[in-house]
Amino acid sequence: MAKELISVHRFINMEARKYPQATGEFSALMREIILTAKLISREVTKAGLADILGMTGDSNVHGEEVKKLDEYSHNLFTHILKYSGHVCAMASEEAEDLLLGPTYTNSGKYVVLLDPLDGSSNIDVNVSIGSIFAIYKRVSEEGKPGERRDFLQPGRDLIAAGYVIYGSSTMLVYTTGQGVHGFTLDPSIGTFVLSHPNMQVPDVCKIYSVNEGYYANWTEGMKAYVQRVKGLGPDAMEKPMSGRYIGSMVADFHRNLLRGGIFMYPGTVKKPEGKLRLMYEANPMSFVIEAAGGYASNGKQRILDIQPESLHQRTPVFLGNREEVLMVEEYLQKYDAVEA
């Protein structure tokens, strides 16, 4: 008997029926995000044939060179969502300030934060990349423009978050905090179909993902933990983990979610705040991993409990199997406290 195909739109509608008070606005917003993901996927798959590779010659707010597909993805997301009627304001990793204006509907209930194209340094070498999104319900008065306080909410207050990975297939993974579900794009019908229902972090942590090129710049606690998972040192694991690092957060995270692993982007001695952005990368991916039974930490506390202070705030990130992330916290507390 053929397996029943459930499209992402049907799935969202099925979930909405569980909430009698639902107005349909969230479902409509998700449809716009899904449309954008399909359009980006189309461009990614023909990137080698189109004039969208390489640099634009500009820099983003972080001083990083902007790639053409970065710019395309940012413009596409912001153009589609600002006309959706459900968003009162947006924020993007590629923009310095809030995205406001007459095309946003002031009555919109939601604000959206975006990393329009994560891992873009891998575009030109045909490695998996992705888009990350986070959705909050506004806390400011409806009928007026969105405000900064609508965005500076802790991650635990997210109403939905997820990512799209553009690889050998295009997958959408998202959660509203009640289960994580994955949908694979069927290009023959142009629809995402449910392929990974109720995703859960495997019990066994087999993989560690971190850029070991920064080893010399790490704190003693981080060095000691990595030595442990490699099977070295006095605390060596009996069965070492496998080291896997792509350099695209979405791709590394997705593999570890499916196979069991821990993704780490720690701070360094000189830059303890790390590189990844709390609002655009850490919070949404933490929301996903915890909904799948894992845990997310900055090495000292749960990421979802951090009170944001700025749109582009950075944080160390440790995501994955709960026991291993807690082990990282233990190592950092033990060794770095002595170092300090």
Image: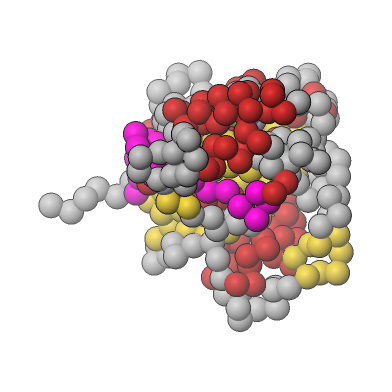
Outermost residue to the front: 234
Look at the picture and state if 17 lies above or below 240: above
On whether residue 210 falls in the magenta region, the answer is: yes
**Residue 236 spot, x, y in % from top left:** 44, 38
Residue in front for this viewpoint, 136 or 211: 211
Please name the residue shown 73% across and 54% down the image: 74
| Quarter of the image where one finds residue 239 | top left
Give the magenta part as a residue range.
195-215
Please name the residue shown 57% across and 37% down the image: 224
**Residue 336 spot, x, y in % from top left:** 68, 28
Residue in front for this viewpoint, 325 or 25: 325
Residue in front for this viewpoint, 156 or 73: 156
Please name the residue shown 65% across and 78% down the image: 50
Look at the picture and state if 84 lies above or below 56: above
**Residue 170 spot, x, y in % from top left:** 47, 58
Outermost residue to the bottom: 49
Please name the residue shown 54% across and 61% down the image: 128
Q: Quadrant of the C terminus?
A: top right
Q: How many numbered discs?
A: 0
Is residue 272 in view? Answer: yes
**Residue 264 spot, x, y in % from top left:** 58, 42
On whether residue 279 falls in the magenta region, the answer is: no
Look at the picture and state if 134 lies above or below 81: above
Left or right, 172 with respect to 204, comes to right
Is residue 314 in view? Answer: no
Q: How did the renderer colour the structure?
A: secondary structure
Left or right, 205 with respect to 27, comes to left
Left or right, 144 with respect to 124, comes to right
